[in-house]
Image (cartoon, grey):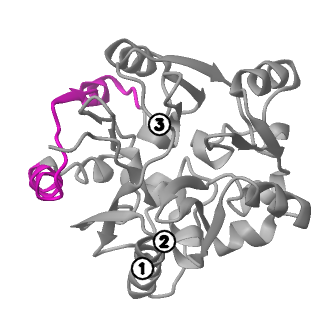
Amino acid sequence: MTEEEQTSGSVLLVRPRAFAFHAEAAATNAFAAATDADVAERALAEFDALATALDGAGVETVILERDGPDAVFPNNWVSFHGDGTMVLYPMATAARRLERDTEALLPLLDRAGFAVKRTVDLTGHERHGRFLEGTGSLILDRPRAHAFASRSVRTDAAVIADFDAALGYSTLLFDALDRADRPIYHTNVLLSLGSDFAVLCSHAVPAEQRGGLIDALERSVIAVSFERMSKFACNIIELRGRSGPVIALSAAALESFTPAQRRQLEQFATLLPVPIPTVEAVGGGSVRCMIAEIHLPRR
């Protein structure tokens, strides 16, 4: 597989037409909570604010519209790679599998000038109860063709093996538990990778695995607490903007960092915070979950 850059200047976003609390998904996502409020309209406003902020920073946005309570999180079902590969992933809940609308997606990418040269379809694992939810489950070190993944119901070693074989990756699989000793549902709520930095909730990783993981990241590591992780401090993403790198993150994530940690992040990129309290509270995911970065070649 051709070496690619860690960051992209183009992203896929999905504007959610029916955002709502998803009880089945919440069964394995301790970050999501039910509410009686009418959240769909507020989630749309938060989505539009993110899209506007990215556009203002010079990040190209390709926007698909979909129904489904969790449709705002496209990074769980698709990823795009520099050699023209598009990967489709097996999803843990049946309702979310309906989000994989390639009939609408492929023409959208084509109109934007991107070339999909092959599709790696891992969704057959769903028949066997094995799941791997995209870059929620896999944290990709793209230049090194290496990945990091924490074990959970949504992150299965057998699917990872197929991903590695198809894309020429090697993945470091590790354990990560919350304060109640439950597996953390997605790796990207405890770990993010930029070009030269990582943000990690190191306390979530067992002591006997922690040092090896930190060494393998080969980056300057900003370690955050469980409390900051719960505010989505790790659910951030570095992108290429018009004037240089930007880190897209939620307002809550930004506020959770200490002043010293903010200064550390600002050494690597301009911070681009967006308030998305409804998406975070009800959907149990944050800004990084809302973004599927596009690394595809241009036609």
**Vertical placement of residue 173 versus 285, above or below:** above
The CA distance from mark 1 to mark 2 is 9 Å
First in sequence, mark 3 or 1: give its number: 3
- On-image quarter of the C terminus: top left
Q: Secondary structure at mark 1?
A: helix
Q: Along the line of sight, which residue is nearer the eye, 55 or 87?
A: 55
Q: Residue at x 11, y 58 (%)?
A: 111
Q: Along the line of sight, which residue is nearer the eye, 74 or 185?
A: 74
Residue 88 position, x and y percent, is: 27, 36
The CA distance from mark 2 to mark 3 is 19 Å
Q: Residue at x 61, y 56 (%)?
A: 236
The CA distance from mark 3 to mark 1 is 24 Å
Q: Which residues are magenta?
A: 103-131
Task: Report the side of 147 relative to 20 (left or right).
Answer: right
Q: List the residue tagged with mark 1.
A: 52
Q: Amino acid at mark 1?
A: Thr
Residue 6 position, x and y percent, is: 51, 38
Task: Report the side of 215 relative to 115 (left or right).
Answer: right
Q: Residue at x 50, y 87 (%)?
A: 37
Residue 116 belongs to magenta span: yes
Q: Amino acid at mark 2?
A: Ala
- On-image quarter of the N terminus: top left
Quadrant in the picture for residue 218: top right
Q: List the residue tagged with mark 2.
A: 57
Callout in the foreground (1, 2):
2
